[in-house]
Amino acid sequence: MNAPVEFSDSGAATTNERVLGWDLLRGLCAVAVAAYHYLYFTKLAQVHTWGSYGVFLFFVLSGASLAYTYAGRIQAGQFSFPEFLFVRFWRLAPLYVALMLMVVPTMAIWYGDLWRLIYTLLLNLTFLMGLYQPISLSLLTGGWSLGVEAVFYLLFPLLIWSFRSWRAALGVFALLLVLQVAWISATVGATVVPEQTWAYYNAPAFGAYFMGGCVIGVLQRKARDPAGLSWGTGVALIVAGFATMVAVNPAEAAQELLGWRAVLLGTLCFFMVAAAGRMSLPPLGARLARRLGDATYGMYLIHPVLYFYLVPGLGLHAFKSGTVAQRLGLTAALMCASFALALLSEYFFERPVRQWSRRVWARRAGLRLSAAHNRSSTP
């Protein structure tokens, strides 16, 4: 258990690699979170488990994907932390900032205090709102989780460094799990005032999910047969996971985070990510997984904006509280619109911006290397 962790790729991993089973699961998580919000907003249903554990799955998937891609590089001494942060910032920022600027006029009315709004804008632009109570500082619904994600980006090299041995890595996971349980118990698990409830939405409440994902990512990279599950079996396990969430959904929000539900559903998150990573996808399944993966981030951010800003702008208020058929129709239409807009954003806005950012980094890295070479060759 104390031997160094070896990686089958000898440290070679590219950021273009995709585990398509994770893309599929990631996209279904975005669908589940959007469905939870729309059903809740329109008073059709309250599937609390989809809202909570859909986001928790994002953290597990994030840790797994990053560890799968970068753990070998870190072990081989080929990891640049500034480059990592630069790449991750330009993965999150383009769409988030664009949507945030759309809602600023409304936020200006709500905030009243101009300087407070500017301060909050700066925290959101840098994702530093994740350092403390991002739920109260995020300008977009769901933005709080991106702030927490940014905290994990800052900690990522330290977490991966612990994989110098399995004993150290599993020890870090155990410590984060204890901290997570203690944090949740002290916030949503107590009789609390709103400020304490807000305190739940901080990195300690999700650290074990991210680190557990890192463990899954390292194991996936080391696996001799990384595609050990058939397409049908993998899909059945994922569907069963989301169905289990519905089956144990509590009547009262936050109860899914406590007691036996927390143990069952938390374990289920790790199982679903591990199973999805081992799936062997046929061509049609691979195309579906890519589309869902491409739409994930956009759908997660866009769907609340459509509900709170587009629906009123189109004069569709009546559908929010109309008949069941009207509310279901509105939900279905918004789900489809969110998915379509997310793909358009990915292909025609976010991806081009990311490609531009990579060219900028490569150009600056080339200039630095050239300057260093000139200095070393100067007598």
Image (cartoon, rainbow, N blue to C red):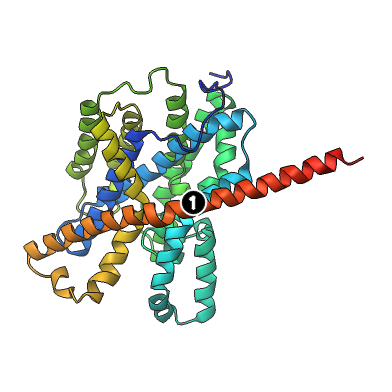
Residue drawn at x 54%, y 52% is 357
Check the image and report above or below for 378 versus 174. below
Q: Picture quarter containing residue 197?
A: bottom left
Q: Name the side, left or right, on which 11 lies relative to 371.
A: left
The residue nearer to you, when weighing 326 against 267, is 326
Q: Name the side, left or right, on which 68 lies relative to 28.
A: right
Secondary structure under tag 1 reads: helix
Residue drawn at x 9%, y 65% is 326
Residue assigned mark 1:
354
What is the total number of numbered labels drawn onto the structure image? 1
Residue drawn at x 47%, y 28% is 218
Tell me where residue 224 appears, x and y as whole percent: 42, 17
Mark 1 Cα shell of 10 Å, populated few (<14), some (14-19), many (≥20): many
The residue nearer to you, when weighing 131 against 187, is 131
Residue 267 at least partly seen: no
Q: Amino acid at mark 1?
A: Arg
Residue 271 at least partly seen: yes
Task: Classify the position of the C terminus by image quarter.
Answer: top right
Check the image and report above or below for 280 versus 43. above
Check the image and report above or below for 328 versus 291. below
Q: Picture quarter containing residue 373?
A: top right
The residue nearer to you, when weighing 89 against 59, is 89
Tell me where residue 230 appears, x and y as whole percent: 25, 24
Residue drawn at x 30%, y 58% is 341
Tell me where residue 356 appears, x and y as whole percent: 52, 53
Tell me where residue 289 appears, x and y as whole percent: 30, 39
The residue nearer to you, when weighing 200 against 191, is 200
Q: Name the side, left or right, on which 64 lies relative to 316.
A: right
Residue lying farthest right?
A: 379
